[in-house]
Image (cartoon, grey):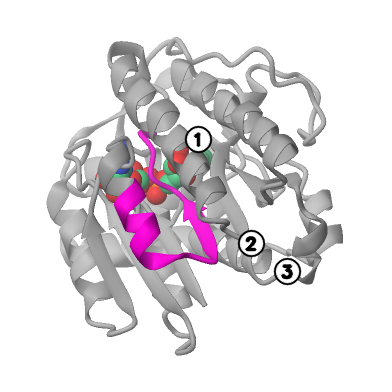
Amino acid sequence: MKILVTGCAGFIGYHLCDYLLKNKKLKIFGLDNLNNYYDIDLKKNRLKSLKKNKNFKFSKIDISDEKKITTNFKQNKYSIVVNLAAQAGVRYSIKNPEVYQKSNINGFFNILENCKKFKVKHLIHASTSSVYGDNKKFPLKEHFNTDKPLSFYAATKKSNEVMAFAYSNIYNLPITILRFFTVYGPKGRPDMSLYKFTDAIINNKIVRLFNNGDHVRDFTYISDVVDAIEKVIFSKNNKEVPYKIFNVSSNNPQTLKKFLNEIEKNCNKISKKVYLKLQKGDVHKTHGSNDLISKQLGFKPKVTIEKGIFNFVKWFKKVD
Ligand SMILES: NC(=O)c1ccc[n+]([C@@H]2O[C@H](COP(=O)([O-])OP(=O)(O)OC[C@H]3O[C@@H](n4cnc5c(N)ncnc54)[C@H](O)[C@@H]3O)[C@@H](O)[C@H]2O)c1
């Protein structure tokens, strides 16, 4: 089976490819534009490790490049496409909305078009808990209102969900949308809190706590996220898919303060903190119900926050 993973040099894409490549029957095609949103060496290192496997083939392509992406789909005839390539990050979208328009809207349109044209059996697409905006009812469920995204990043992801619904409806294209909740783990993103906090503590920098550290996040460990994607790829129910949305969360929200505390324990050091006000675009709390994906696909998150942070800090200390 040929599987395309876009954004394969990214955090989630790398871990997904690495896991799928353990199955020798699969041919994994990775695609990424290797942009410099964060340390490009981290992306190159992830890629270097994937390239060691002969069942992995990489192409440096931007999904917004219609010609190149169409040629790539035509040549490879994928069965499954997992679209993880996107401009991520809530805060970056305040000053750089055009990047989100290009990758997340134009790029996603090219993915949809090619999945339709080349009869891909199942498109799996990464959405985000940010689509829930400032919903006040918890845990967040898939049918809740998502009409008021607080950032342009969230707006592009919500748009993707709606675009995908129309494609699935008109062209009978099977699509599953996965709303990820703050994914963390080794080889994680330098723009995310776990990386930033650990870096600050170890290198004696100041930890900047927005909203006075009162944010609550449903941190979800990377291997649990990979497990959820794998369950969707190999689900026997795919024939009846046309269009589905699942939360992928740990269903175990933590305050940012508790999260920081756990990192401090692992670094054996107390951080120097500065408390800042809420940033525009940030939501106060995320807490996702994972009932739907549990019932339909048997998903069950396994990694505790303590174990997850332990694994991350161990990795960080090695590369720092
Ligand atoms: N990590 C999280 O907590 C989280 C939460 C919710 C949703 N998501 C979504 O999951 C997906 C993967 O996230 P991640 O954390 O691995 O981010 P990431 O930034 O590490 O990975 C994304 C990858 O896509 C590539 N990319 C970006 N624009 C591209 C384009 N136009 N063409 C080709 N490649 C492009 C980047 O170079 C990067 O390697 C994204 O869609 C993101 O929005 C992530």
Relative to 107, say whether 267 is above or below: below
Are there few (<14), some (14-19), or many (20+) residues within 10 Å of tag 3? some
Q: Quadrant of the C terminus?
A: bottom left
Give the total number of marks visible in the rendering: 3
Question: Picture coordinates of residue 155 (x, y %)?
Answer: 53, 19
Image mark for residue 228: 2
Question: Which of the numbered marks, if any, corresponds to residue 235?
Answer: 3
Specify the amino acid type for callout 2: Ala
For the residues marked 3 and 2, what is the alpha-carbon distance in whole angstroms? Answer: 10 Å
Confirm if mark 2 falls within 8 A of ligand 1: no
- Numbered mark located on residue 60 in the image: none
From the top left corner, tell me how far across and down residue 109 is, in percent: 47, 33
Residue appearing at x 45%, y 23% in the figure = 153
Distance from disc 2 to disc 1, alpha carbons, whole Å, reads 28 Å
Q: Which mark is residue 257?
A: 1
* Residue 80 located within the stretch drawn in magenta: yes
